[in-house]
Image (spheres, grey):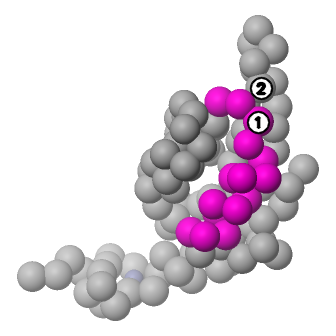
Amino acid sequence: MSEICDKCGLPKDICVCETIAREEQKVRVFTTSRRYGKMITVVAGLGKDVNSKEILRELKTRLACGGTLKDGEIELQGKHKERTVEILLKSGFRREQIEVS
Ligand SMILES: [Zn+2]
């Protein structure tokens, strides 16, 4: 039996809520430094309807770096702006919704 989406009431396999959520979202990618001068790459603005955990897992695997999810924002260890954008594009985000700063 397939799970039902609580947003649109359709079975999850045909529900497009997450796709729509991705299309409407403005995602910000930037690098900043944390304590001890360590650089991190932040992916902010993913929104509640996007599976941030899944994206984090994908980023960590592909970039081979550590990362966490903090207040809905992805924090990756190191400077990975360009590659992060590439991976987001492959995950279904459009270039115009990604803001790199
Ligand atoms: Zn849905």
**SS class of the residue under badge 2?**
strand
Q: What percent of the width, then of the height, locates residue 4?
A: 24, 80
Assign a secondary structure to mark 1.
loop
Q: Main secondary structure of the magenta part?
A: helix
Asked if residue 29 shows in the view, the reply is no
- Write the residue at 54% across / 31% down: 66
Earlier along the polypeptide chain: callout 1 or callout 2?
Answer: 2
Residue under pointer 2: 39
Q: Position of residue 61 (x, y in %)?
A: 49, 45
In the picture provided, is 4 more to the left or to the right than 73? left
Residue range in magenta is 77-91
Whether residue 58 is visible here, answered yes or no, is yes
- Residue at (63, 37) in percent of width and height: 75
Task: List the single residue furthest toward the right.
Answer: 101
Residue type, label 1: Lys
Residue identified by numbered label 1: 79
Q: Quadrant of residue 7?
A: bottom left
Callout 2 crowding tier (Cα within 10 Å): few <14, some 14–19, many ≥20: some
| Residue at image point 73% right, 59% down | 85
The residue under label 2 is which amino acid type?
A: Met
Q: Is residue 3 magenta?
A: no
Residue 37 location, x and y as percent? 81, 14
Q: CA distance from mark 1 to mark 2?
A: 6 Å
Classify the position of the N terminus by image quarter.
bottom left
For residue 50, the mark is none
